Amino acid sequence: MIQLLAAGGEGPKTPTDYINHHLTHLAKDLTPNVSSDTFMAIHLDTMVTSFLLGLLMMFGMWVATRRATAGVPGRWQAFVELVLEFIHGQTKDAYHGTSKLVTPIAITLFCWIIMMNSMDFIPVDFIAKATEAVGLHNWRPVPTADVNATLAMSITVFFLMIGFAIRAKGVGGFIHELFTAPFGPWMAPANLLLNIVELLSKPVSLAMRLFGNMYGGEIVFLLIWMLASAGFVGTLASAVFGLGWGLFHILIVILQAFIFMMLSVVYLSLMEEHH
């Protein structure tokens, strides 16, 4: 059995203990005398990390606007402009409504999700050492590997969908379509059931797709880092495999953010269409 030294010097641990340690959230239980792994537990690591990354994203955008020039742009301004123009172009092609909020929503989703996904590139033991230095023995650094975070974003998109639909059709028109589309008024119960399933499946699929890919990537990284416990050869193999998986994971990080953003924009556009 491979023996691993737990973070903080707690003694030898098995590979299972090592993985479980790094997959355990820093949770605040809202219900007394109940395990922190409950519905009423707040994952503080997810909330704090995502909040700080959101602030960092806004600061980066603010720096780009403060240093913006009409002449030759600096590297950071050029990069930000490239990203914004790309997102604006994609949004313009996918959204056919009139709302001016869609592009800012798309920019926020894409940039924020990329930053949260990118936390997966930092070796978990580096973060564990830093957090344990301040007395935090559990800290999962990738917010999008927590289904609570991805569901929170997708549920927000769901409420935006409802809001866009009501804005375009009115409350009466939205409810009327729930009962009459796609089979006509004579099939009202079937229409309502089908539309409810379709509406609910969109945020669930958004959340689970992003969560599944990032959680799977986190597991693969943990398995690779465990190779380092097998001596020099294991450390070398861990470095090689980690580099290879990291390069491939760049594609996953960007692609998953892009898919979440584009599907959100498409869903908002579809909700404004009259049936």
Image (spheres, helix red, strand yellow):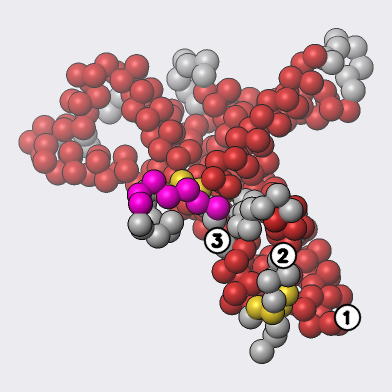
Find disc 1 in the rendering and name its residue: 232
The image position of residue 124, as x and y in percent, is: 71, 59
The crowding category of the residue bearing disc 2, from other C-alpha atoms within 10 Å (few below 14, some 14 to 19, many at least 20), is few
Q: Is residue 132 left or right of residue 259?
A: right
Residue pictured at 16% horizontal, 33% vertical? 179
Find disc 2 in the rendering and name its residue: 8
The image position of residue 85, as x and y in percent, is: 70, 25
Viewer-nearest of discs 3 and 1: 3
Which segment is the magenta one?
26-32
Q: Is residue 81 above or below residue 157?
A: above
The image position of residue 159, as x and y in percent, is: 37, 30
Q: Residue 19 in magenta?
A: no
Q: How many marks?
A: 3
- SS at mark 2? loop
Residue pictured at 85% horizontal, 10% vertical? 70
Q: Is residue 152 left or right of residue 233?
A: left
Amino acid type at image mark 2: Gly
Q: Answer with mark 2 or mark 1, whichever residue precedes in sequence.
A: 2
**Alpha-carbon span between mark 2 and mark 1:** 22 Å
Q: Which of 18 and 196 lies nearest the eye of the viewer? A: 18
Viewer-nearest of discs 2 and 1: 2
Q: Which of 48 and 243 lies nearest the eye of the viewer? A: 48
The crowding category of the residue bearing disc 1, from other C-alpha atoms within 10 Å (few below 14, some 14 to 19, many at least 20), is few
- SS at mark 3? loop
Q: Is residue 122 above or below residue 30?
A: below
Q: Answer with mark 3 or mark 2, whichever residue precedes in sequence.
A: 2
Outermost residue toward the left in this view:
186
Q: Note whether residue 205 is visible.
A: no
Amino acid type at image mark 1: Phe
Residue pictured at 88% horizontal, 28% vertical? 75
- Quarter of the rendering occupied by the C terminus: top left
Which disc, if any, is residue 24?
3
